[in-house]
Amino acid sequence: MLAPTALEVLAHIGRYSLLIGRAFRSVGEWRTYWSAFFLQAVRIGLDSLPIVILAAAFSGAVTTVQTAYQLVSGLVPRSVIGSIVTESVILELAPVISALVLAGRVGARIAAELGTMRVTEQIDALEVMGLNAVSFLVLPRVLAGLLMFPVLITAAAVVGIAGGLLAGIVSGELPPAEFLLGARSFFKPFDVVFMLIKAFTFGFLVTSISCYQGYYASGGAEGVGRATTQAAVVSCITVLLADYLLANLLL
Amino acid sequence: MGRENHSPQARIRVEKLVKSFDGQPVLAGVDLEIYQGETFCIIGRSGTGKSVLLKHLVGLLTPDRGTVWVDGEDIFRVPYGRLRQIRRKFGVLFQGAALFDSLTAEENVAFPLRMLGDRRLGEAEIQKRVRRCLAEVGLEDMGHKYPAELSGGMRKRVGLARAIALEPEFILYDEPTSGLDPETAQTINELIRKLARELGVTSIVVTHDMHSVLEIADRAGLLYEGRMHWVGTIEEMRRSQDPILLRFVKASEYQL
């Protein structure tokens, strides 16, 4: 893939902003989008739960094993492992790994769906009926992302911590009582707030970027393929960038 | 909204429409008037911008210069909300029918009825209208099928049923017979004629199928090098000595 020039990136950002602005313009007609919103909430949320939970459980478990391996010194109490795993999962692993998984799963799906609708003129058909096609297609998906990403990422955090706890038991390195002691001793409620802020941000970015890629797809099957790849790639990159920015701003 | 006094009966007026894609000019100043109740065929070779012109009539594309008036309203200067209302005067049959593939034929026809926000119809009324529209195109038994289970000709007929669901005043057809066998194409031509007659709609048909033109058109216009090169009735077409028109007609192997 050729790297885009700075000007092209700016052009994309401009067109993206206009599209999202247009999507929220007819937000007042919520009745039209209500059922679509529920459908998307199920597709983005419920259907993604297994893969998100799987990724979270393993990342939590690996963190426990790896932290135990790195803290071999007898000077540090083993319960510290519990606090490191809990903090890592809540602050970074659950939101970022889930968002990257969802960029592939949800982002690609949205872009492929909208891209196909674009190249088969279904989007034109919506417009001609007098619907605001942008709102009709983009709004339910972005709102579903805003609602479901926090839900999924919260579930991922719970499962990730449980995975870490379980790995401690299985490996025999860390009894659950010590893990939980460590988990509690350094826990700050703001960590959860920070996680939710990340979740909202990632939810908005992944769904809106994927909608943009799909909505402006062109050039038949190949164009849809390109839009789908772009949706996943650009979503991943912006999630990582936003992750770094938020850490800098809020921590 | 600027209302102007154009010739009283022209319902759609295309004015010096210019459009290019990536520096490639497609429309170079198209002028055209469409009158109440007529069936107008836009003809021309592939790639001359017939479909591009059609999409400008409902504001799906925005011109570089020039404009389109629908019933005295400049559709590129009205607010978006008004454009959406103007669009409801139109039904469009897209080239590939553009059916929503996750919905059955029935649901496709019902879709615009369910979505129109201003006058909500009861479910019974919607079902009645859907059945009537599907019967109109001769597909009353196919309502439960998904687009993927229908043939190309049937998809176009469902697309047509959906286009007439909101009782439009104009129907636009984008290559309605392309990719169909001659017999199915004939069915579509008959449908176009029937709808024009029964519903009193104004029809605009983009096609390169001369057979279709002779079957359905009241008037036709030849799009050539970005302009309306020739416009006239079918009678005038038969008598015309215009070399470019003759070349197009001859190439279609149809004797006028």
Image (cartoon, coloured by chain):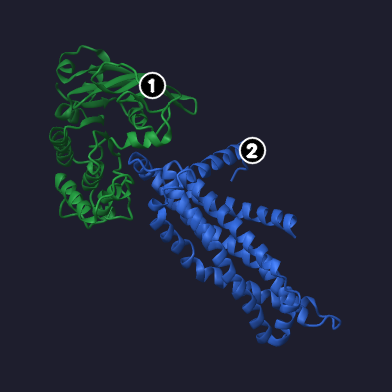
Chain colours: A blue, B green
Q: Residue at x 38, y 28 (%)?
A: B75
The residue mark sitting in front, 2 or 1, is 1
Of A209 and B77, nearer the camera is B77
Residue A197 or residue B92, whichever sits in front? A197
Q: Residue at x 15, y 17 (%)?
A: B238
> To which residue does mark 1 refer?
B2
Residue furthest toward the top? B241
Q: Residue at x 33, y 33 (%)?
A: B86
Up the image or down, A107 lies above or below B98; here it is below
Which percent across, then down, holds residue B112? 29, 46
Q: Secondary structure at mark 1?
A: loop
Check disc 2 and report the residue beneath it.
A5
Residue A55 visible, this angle: no
Give the image location of residue B90, x and y in percent.
28, 35
The crowd level at tag 1 (other Cα within 10 Å; few <14, some 14-19, many 20+) is few
Q: Position of residue A143 (x, y in %)?
A: 50, 55
Residue in the image at 35% along x and 40% along y: A130
User: Is B117 drawn above or below residue A108 in the view shown?
Assistant: above
Residue type, numbered disc 1: Gly
Asked whether disc 2 touches disc 1, contact meaning CB atoms under 8 Å apart, the reply is no
Q: Could you tell me which chain the residue with mark 2 belongs to?
A: A
